[in-house]
Amino acid sequence: MNKKFALGKLQISLIFCLIFSFAISGGIFFLSQMIGALILDNYFIKTSYIETQTNQAVNDFKNYVTDNDLSINDRDQMARWVRSEKYVNVNIYKDGKLLYTFDSNNSVVSSEGYLQNPILSYGPLYDIEFADTSAQMSMECYFEYKYYYIVTFLGVAFSFVCFIIIILLFINRKTSYIGLLENEIKILEGGNLDYQITMHGNDELASLAQSINEMRKSFIERLENEDKARLANSELVTAMSHDLRTPLTALVGYLDIIEFKKYKSEENLNQYIHNSREKAYQIKHLSDKLFEYFTVFNTEEEDLALETFDGIQLIDQMIDEQLLLLQNNGFYFEFESCVTPFQIEINLIAIRRVFDNIFSNITKYADKSMPVKIKCYVKDDEWLMIDVENHINQNLKAANGTGIGMKTCKKIIEKHQGNISASKIDDMYYVHICLSV
């Protein structure tokens, strides 16, 4: 019920505009009435306009009576003249008695014999000759009223015009903004997504403009991400095709030698078989990496099943597993475990992939004569920090890997609302992991 009748900011602005316009136009009306009345009052006081008009009306009435040979009893004819004048009331007296009163609005005729002092009530008396007798008359004139009416009419008209102008200015401001939004949306439709939508005010139209801007930014970001993903996939396919082609070509060559018996001795045969197995495992390793990459990149954040673990116990366990791998491969290490208790919410399988990738690279490219250093600590009671560093084996041939492992790790960590970075400085290789706790 409340939502149904809730007023929006645009409606409230319109209501305030109506109230403001009404107040301004009302003030203009009253001001115009005051000024107009003041001007007319000064004019009537300083001039003899009313007196002149009254004398003219008295003479006109006398001439009307004389020209039409009216008797004192011809009330209808006298009433007709009064009606035609609009701003005149006529009183007829005979021997000090009020006989008739002709009202310009209703033309009411009074009864005879009503005793009244005419001088005190109706101003000066004028002698008038009827066809059958002599009498007296007084006249009440309101000729100035028509000018006050004109001032009132002009004040109403001017106030109404001001009211309409203010409303139209407000509406024009909003319609102009709507037209501007329409033109700017057409610019976006034309493909110029970098164009910034103009924002004015803080009503629903401004909110609409902001929403369009946010939508535009989201669309740009989506397009950029798609371009990046397309470029990354293209680079990945190119790199993987090269990395797969090399061992695959060698494998086909070894198998051809074996099939066509081009080996010289049994020892050569066993060597070719051994090399074939190595190339086959290399191809399998690359295909597993590729499968893992697409599995991770095609999994949404909400698809990750997160579980809460005791942080120190879990991290120590996973790193101990990797340290055993290092030890079996002839590496020695320095491990500094975390001392601050914490809880962490992760997908265990995904995080294991990260550690497998990192320590697998260490076994391939690290210098066994130098220690591998691992340090874990909690920062600001909010972040788990894991730092891994090792010396690079300078005796290895340049390894141009696809980088698929680190890309997979980065995607997994990002899905856990964290970040991972890898850097190489001189002969040192650093990996830094940050996870929310």
Image (spheres, rainbow, N blue to C red):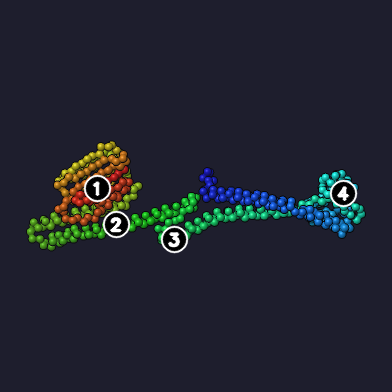
Whole-number angstrom distance, CA of label 3 to CA of label 4: 87 Å
Disc on the earlier residue, 2 or 4 = 4
Label 1 vs label 2, nearer the camera: 1
Secondary structure beneath dot 2 equals helix
In the image, residue 383 above or below residue 37: above
Residues under numbered marks 2 and 4 in contact, where contact means CB atoms less than 8 Å apart: no
Whole-number angstrom distance, CA of label 3 to CA of label 1: 45 Å
Q: Nearer the viewer, residue 61 or 125?
A: 125
Secondary structure beneath dot 1 equals strand
Disc on the earlier residue, 1 or 2 = 2
Q: Nearer the viewer, residue 289 or 220?
A: 220
Label 3 vs label 2, nearer the camera: 3
Mark 1 = which residue? 431
- Tell me the crowding category of disc 1: few under 14, some 14 to 19, or many 20 or more residues within 10 angstroms, Cα based: some
Q: Amino acid at mark 1?
A: Val
User: Which residue in the rendered view is the most extreme toward the left?
Assistant: 265
Residue 383, position as x, y percentages in the image: 30, 42
Taking the spot 13% from the left edge, 55% from the top edge, the residue there is 274
Residues under numbered marks 3 and 1 in contact, where contact means CB atoms less than 8 Å apart: no
- Residue 369 is left or right of residue 388, and the answer is left
Q: Amino acid at mark 2?
A: Ala
Q: Nearer the viewer, residue 115 or 412?
A: 115
Q: Nearer the viewer, residue 143 or 364?
A: 143
Mark 2 = which residue? 232
